Amino acid sequence: MRKKLLVPAVAAATLLLAVPASAVTPTPGAPGAGDPYYPTYGNGGYRVSHYDLRLKYQPATDRLEGTATLLATATQDLSRFDLDFALDVSQVLVDGHPAKFAETGVQELEITPATPLAKGSQTTIVVRYAGLPSTVSRYGFTAWQRTSDGAVIADEPEAAWWWFPSNDHPSDKATFDVSVLVPDGTQAISNGVLTSQRSQLGWTRYDWRENKPQATYLTTLAIGRFDLTTGTSPAGVPVVNAYSQNLGDNADAARASVERTGELVDWLSGYFGPYPFSSAGGYVPAVPTHYALETQTRVFYSPAQFAGGANTSVVVHELAHQWYGDSVSLERWSDIWLNEGFATYAQWLWSEHEDEGTTQQLADYVYTSHPADDAFWTVKPGDPGADNQFADAVYDRGALAIQVLRTTIGDDAFFKLLKAWPTEHRYGNGTIAQFQALAERLSGKNLDGLFQTWLYTPSKPTALPATARPHLAAPSTPTAEPRSWQQIKAAQQH
């Protein structure tokens, strides 16, 4: 029988203080990142620094096979943790050892490693999987768009679940290697830079690398038959664009718009600072959707964006997101104004540049074209709610708020602010509160009233700050529609 060891009280206390951190009882990581809009999106207990995705896709059958390797760091002592994923998993390894796994909830892959993970430890997670992504429905839809010659994945706020396991929330950004094997004659396009391309035995592998932190929903994949163009912007930014070979009547308008990417990247750099990534570009697949999405370095455009002809305004919108939304990502989805308000305001700046309506004329038009009883004013751009996250007010009232901010703090402070935000938060995340604090620091003004009125009040503002133009506050008939308006609105299609 083991003898009980008697320890003096002081010595016992000393021993308790000396208990190592590893003796803390491991607990499960949260099955969500704590976002009020999407409680189950993302996960707690770890952070991912890198994703290595090695995939094989057969367009004829829609079968996707993959091995995902995640490099992660535990942020607590973990007994188990979740990944967001929807395809069938055959094996999970944690630090080389088989781990138990189970599907729980709507998109959770619950993983129990053979040995708990200590807080601060670095771990390697390998997930082997396969499935038909277009047949997998979550929350009543699939984000995987199958095409006549392949497939496309580009959606917001969720897209990753259908093709790789992840911590699917923009607050946990990582670098990516995406390697895709497809039949010869088919191409695979993703984010960043194409590092290699090689063919063997009827299959071609494309290796893409994005070496700057990237949110999971901004990670894109397009498989099909494309015409590719490559070049550089006048300032030297590499540009890669791709167009489906069966765009039909929209082909020329798409090219006339997207081929101006290099020019527009350099133009936007004048407002937002140096372009933050190693490449730029976009792709236009043959899909029936109507929206565009700021997928990092390689913007997704639906052909319908160009049904009315060339539209450089929508290209400006998505490229502006490379600073406001991609390099600096929102911390919570309620911060969506930091993405859409500023991308829309970039369109207003482009409109003025092209002599199709000044930023103030656009602000006048937005304000006067919506009467006080219009539901437009009930949406709060600073906290619109999940159902209104992409409502017109987030874009238009959001850009109007930026124009009010500009007239309040003056052009000198305003244009310093446009560059300071993506500089100070480069490759990270930010909140509206942090943006307001920066605006106040650069302008020397208290902006509580302005932000409360224009971003958080669910009614039409009846007065502007004293330093802003007073005529907007008075009831008036709608002003004339600026010539750029229809092209600006095209970027808001969903």
Image (spheres, rainbow, N blue to C red):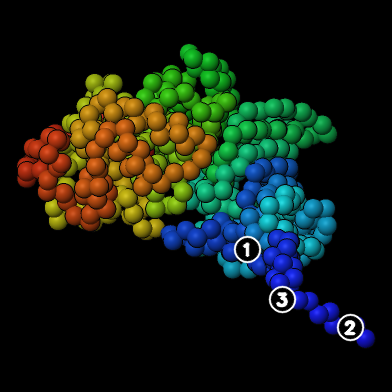
Q: Badge 1: few (under 14), some or many (20 or more) residues near its Cα, within 10 Å?
A: many
Q: Report x, y in % for residue 472.
A: 11, 39
Which type of secondary structure does the marked residue at label 2 adopt?
Answer: loop
Given this view, does label 2 or label 3 mark the residue nearer the observer? Answer: 3
Label 2, on which residue? 3
Q: Residue at x 77, y 28 (%)?
A: 198
User: Which disc number belongs to residue 29?
Assistant: 1
Q: CA distance from mark 1 to mark 3?
A: 36 Å
Measured as percent of width and height from the top left, residue 132 is found at 66, 54
CB contact under 8 Å: marks 2 and 1: no
* Mark nearer the N terminus (2 vs 1): 2
Residue 419, horizontal then vertical, whole percent: 39, 28
Secondary element type, mark 3: helix
In primary-sequence order, the first of circles 1 and 3 is: 3
Residue 264 visible (yes or no) = no
- Which residue is situated farthest in the right direction here? 1
**What's under tag 3, amino acid-wise?**
Ala
Q: Earlier in the sequence, mark 2 or mark 3?
A: 2
Q: Nearer the viewer, mark 2 or mark 1?
A: 2
Q: Is residue 9 left or right of residue 406?
A: right
177 or 185: nearer the viewer: 177
Of badges 1 and 3, the one in the foreground is 3
Where residue 178 sits in the image (x, y, percent)? 67, 38
Q: CA distance from mark 2 to mark 1?
A: 38 Å
Task: Identify whether 483 is placed above or below 90.
Answer: above
Amino acid type of the residue tagged 1 in the rendering: Gly
Residue drawn 84% across the image and 79% down it: 5
Q: How many marks?
A: 3
Which residue is rendered at x = 56% and y = 40% of the image? 214
Tag 3 residue:
9
Q: State the separation of the CA atoms marked 2 and 3.
A: 18 Å
Confirm or deny contact between disc 1 and disc 3 (CB under 8 A). no
